[in-house]
Amino acid sequence: MTEATRTSAVEPVAVDDGAAARAETASADWTAPSKARDDGWRGSANRDDLSTVQRLRDGRMTDAAVGWAVTLTITLLAFLIRIQNLGYPKNLVFDETYYAKDAWSLLKFGYERNWPDDANAQVVAGTPDVYSSTAEFVVHPPLGKWLIAVGEHWFGMNAFGWRFMACVFGSLLVFATIRLARRLSRSTLIGGIAGLLLTLDGLAFVMSRTALLDIFQSFFLVAAVACCVADRDWYRHRLADALEHRGQHDFHGEFGPIVWLRPWRFAAGVMFGAALACKWNSVFVLAVFGVLSVLWDVGARRLAGANWRSWLAVLIDGIPAFVRMVVVAVAVYVSTWIPWLLGTGGYNRDWGLKNPDHPWVKAFGEGFASLIYFHKEIYEFHTGDYINKATHPYDAHPLGWLAMVRPTGFDAVNDIKPGTDGCVGPENCIRVISAMGTPVLWWMAAIALVVCAVWWIGGRDWRFGVPVLGAMATYLPWFNYTDRPLFFFYSITIIPFTVIGLALVMGLILGPANSPGRRRGAMIVGVAIALVALNFAYIYPVLTDQLLPYSEWLSRMWLRSWI
């Protein structure tokens, strides 16, 4: 949640690929294992003609150099677009008033401190060390603020400093999106399209230039899901290796060897832990993909010929998966609180000392008991009467998020008179930073998400389930909290998945390289990308606080709810 309210200012079960490999790819052009060319949705032989080992090895791509070149080029493009004039405006915008200052006090003391009412003006004036001596009650974990503090350490307590790491991680979000889309589609082209579309999204752009926590959370979540999908391929390749070593076509009803080494699953646990250490609602994505990844193991065993014994993977692979993902995530999360635990000045840090007879203190010691009590207070803030009775002018019901019904205004200077601040008249001018997505992109992506759901369930293609489940795991839980103010910018965790879904649908439109309709598909996809680019360029002034005559600003507000 935003702290602005403090002041009121697959393999899925139903489409398991083990029973028949053809069900896994019934709808799409996949690359046969011997193919290496990258031509969108790549053409392949009939999946029924492939051996079990070949089906398990699906996912190996041999254009690594091209893949990395495309990934790094688009990521660099995203970074260069985002870092332009990053230190403008110089003031603290929207919830930067919390997180930039929290990060500075973390850097100085290892915990967040309260600030005087005029702190923002003093920070902008270049005298940032005006924090008070009392600890601040904060309602989010510390990792995102520690990352903001890195930029402040390098560049100082100024607008460029507190936004720099958001810019870095906003660019890394593009990187992670490309790698996930590329692995899902088995196509560097589709991965590149997904990254380019996210580069040109207005919300991702603004969040990459603002010192809030959500851009860090979004990167870690996409990276975690990418690790889960990479683990799926890794696991299948190990089963294929085992079959080749045995000289067998399949396991003939046996469970097969246990795959102990799962580096990608461990990496997913680290990424999920980091996401949780930015914002707690990351737990929903961990739950969904933790279960899904184990079901992928079951599907891989069925494909390898384990038959009913494939379900033993729920225990044999599932229990280690819980350790590698959930236990590791919890360990990473707790580690981000170490400075608070080692210090003595944090908010409620002395609760355990003041309550030595409490069962928590006796069970966990005074430090961890204090941390648990602090978490209880944070949870009560997020769910209690105070937040549920709060109001905010940019409150946006999640029902309208995918259609971008109510963007969030981060900063505005209204009614700039002619002759003032460069306004030439005859009408008044305005400067705004609107956390809005690129409308054409969001609306196409919302439609594509429906197509993905149909293709996943009806077409029995596991790949399309990943963006659907990723988007829904970051979206649907918010419907439980509509009694409190919610904001459109929370959907920064949704857009990478919907963009991947759009890129996958564009892959369907492109079709195989040698298909008669390939040129027509390429024209459709090219026009769609061009429209996104033009739309992004058109709304760019309202993303960057540029001076606009009022009528020109209004021409970019296509819906009345955007005003």
Image (cartoon, rainbow, N blue to C red):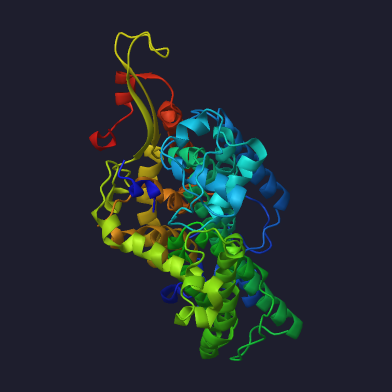
Where is residue 312 shown, x and y percent of the image? 54, 88
Q: Quadrant of the image for the N terminus?
A: bottom left
Quadrant in which residue 288 is drawn: bottom left
Q: Can you say whether 150 is above or below 327 in the image?
A: above
Name the residue located 43 percent from the left edge and 34 percent from the top edge.
118
Q: Can you say whether 235 is above or below 225 in the image?
A: below
Where is residue 151 shown, x and y percent of the image? 62, 42
Q: Can you say whether 33 is above or below 240 in the image?
A: above
Where is residue 389 shown, x and y percent of the image? 23, 54
Q: Nearer the viewer, residue 181 or 58?
A: 181
The outermost residue toward the right is 245
Asked if residue 233 shows in the view, the reply is no
Instruction: Tell me if 451 is positioned left or right of 215 in this view.
Output: left
Q: Quadrant of the image for the C terminus?
A: top left
Instruction: Tell me if 107 is positioned left or right of 376 in this view.
Output: right
Asked if residue 423 shows in the view, the reply is yes
Q: How many marks?
A: 0
Name the residue located 69 percent from the left edge and 62 percent from the top edge.
34
Q: Nearer the viewer, residue 157 or 300?
A: 157
Q: Can you say whether 431 is above or below 486 in the image?
A: above
Quadrant in which residue 225 is drawn: bottom right
Name the residue located 29 percent from the left edge and 43 percent from the top edge.
405
Name the residue located 50 percent from the left edge and 53 percent from the top edge.
218
Where is residue 209 shown, x and y percent of the image? 51, 37
